[in-house]
Amino acid sequence: MAHLIAPSILAADFLHLKEGIDIVNNSNADWLHIDVMDGHFVPNISFGLALMPAFKSGCKKTKDVHLMISNPDQYLEAFVYEGADVLTVHYEACDHLHRTVQRIKELGAKAGVAINPHTSVDLLDDILEEVDVVCVMSVNPGYGGQKFIYQTLPKVRKLRAKLDERNLDALIEIDGGVGMQNAESLLQAGANVLVAGSSVYKSKNPVETIARLKNIGQV
């Protein structure tokens, strides 16, 4: 299966969000990654529900919504209603993770679980059969433009081995500091989805950068 590229709109020019969305629409990007931050679970505050209708109507690609928030269960239905195709919650924010994942799927979205850099992939052993996406954070969540944490690579290899051993189809998504300098290593380690923020939106030609990321490993 070819890997997926999910540009993170958090890194776009907020004065020109429509242009940021159109970069995804008019490129061979697969998903639009939308970071929702509450200033509580993470120190930053970013997009909320009020912007989701604009993303829903403006973006033709899969909307990949990453909830970096406390008490995500309160907002699952609203985010799916407003267009989330993939809805990811944090392992660290969920008291009843299995129930949360099941609810996301009942609502009709793909269910993702994200883990912070300090969280072991072993803690997901009892939920892997239920999830569609595992998002491995390769920076500490809360801000864009951070440096990639290279301990992510052995985590991805370990997670890939677990999924393959159990013949599971969950996608491994990498979020944070992803660019041309590490994308190939991440894909070789077993990642399927690369979230690219600054490396896309801060580049001179974002559409070309997406194409380069998409073409890694293609013959």
Image (tube, grey):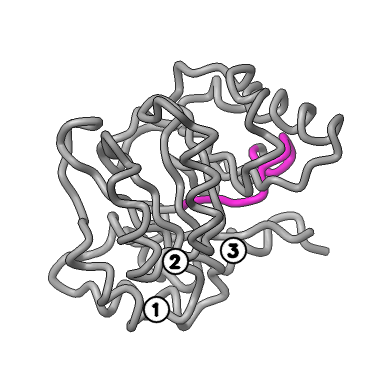
Distance (Cα) linking label 1 and label 3? 21 Å
Residue beneath the point at 41% across and 68% down: 206
Could you tell me the amino acid type at mark 2? Lys
Q: Secondary structure at mark 1?
A: loop
Query: Could you give the CA–CA distance between mark 1 and mark 2, rounded to whole angstroms?
Result: 8 Å
Q: Which residue is mark 1?
A: 59
In the image, residue 37 lies at what x, y percent? 24, 44
Residue 82 image-quadrant placement: bottom left
Disc 2 crowd, CA 10 A, few/some/many (<14, 14-19, 20+):
many
* Label 1 CA crowd tier, 10 Å (few <14, some 14–19, many 20+): many
Residue positioned 83% across, 64% down in the render: 219
Query: What kind of element bears circle 3?
Result: helix
Q: Nearer the viewer, mark 1 or mark 3?
A: 1
State if disc 3 and disc 1 touch (CB < 8 Å).
no
The residue singled out by tag 3 in the image is 212
The residue carrying mark 2 is: 63
